[in-house]
Image (spheres, helix red, strand yellow):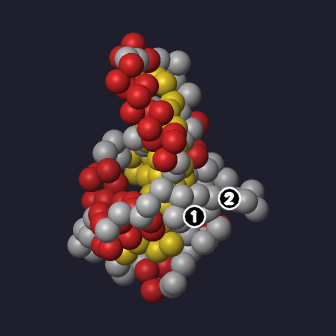
Amino acid sequence: MLWLPVAEPDLTVGPTVLTSGRVLAVASDHPLADRGSASLEDLADNHVVDLGPGAPEYWVSSMTPVRTPLGRRIPRGPIARTFHEILTLVAAGHCVHPLGEIAARYNSPPGIVFVPVRDAPALHFALIWRSTADRPTIRALAQTAADLGPISLDQAHADTADGPVPPGAA
């Protein structure tokens, strides 16, 4: 499962299975840490992680645009290649970084506060598989996921806290 978009020709994009909001990971002593939320405009006042040449630019830009909605440039750097490198750089105060709300839900690294980004579009996560691995079993799984439809991260959390939510009940 990856956030969309995914445009590599050797990958098949299946149905969307999860939607979530976005958060901004900031050091616990960063001025944004005490605010109730952040905006995309706040990114222009901070550096965000540069994921380097190995990550497709269209995919990186879907999470961290090059410019804010008002056209201000969002500075990039330092470079990180992994999720844990991003968290280490954020905790050290070298940058801030937008992430899916799922990162905040399932991680609580010391020295980091996750602030909701109030004006960012929702993330959509879809099933993704290598096109050469396309088999009837994968298609059946994808069809089942499509039939059930996507759930929000809040629904997924409610499922684990209160039991499953019946399809179509949300």
From the image, which quarter does the N terminus lie in? top left
Find residue 170 and report its horizontal and vertical position in percent: 53, 65
Task: Residue 54 in the image: state x and y as whole percent.
Answer: 41, 31
> Which sits earlier in the primary sequence, circle 1 or circle 2?
1
* Position of residue 118 measured from the top left corner of the image (x, y, whole percent): 60, 72
Specify the label residue 140 is tagged with: none
**Real-space CA distance between mark 1 and mark 2, rounded to the nearest whole angstrom:** 7 Å
Answer with the quarter of the image where residue 120 lies: bottom right
Q: Is residue 157 left or right of residue 34?
A: left
Amino acid, disc 1:
Leu
Residue annotated with mark 1: 43
- Please name whichever residue, 114 or 170, is drawn nearer the observer in this view of the structure: 170
Q: Residues within 10 Å of mark 2 (few under 14, many from 20)?
A: some
- Indicate which disc residue 68 carries: 2
Q: Which residue is outermost to the left?
A: 110
Helix, strand or loop for disc 1: helix
Q: Amino acid at mark 2?
A: Thr
Residue at (56%, 28%) from the top-left corner? 7
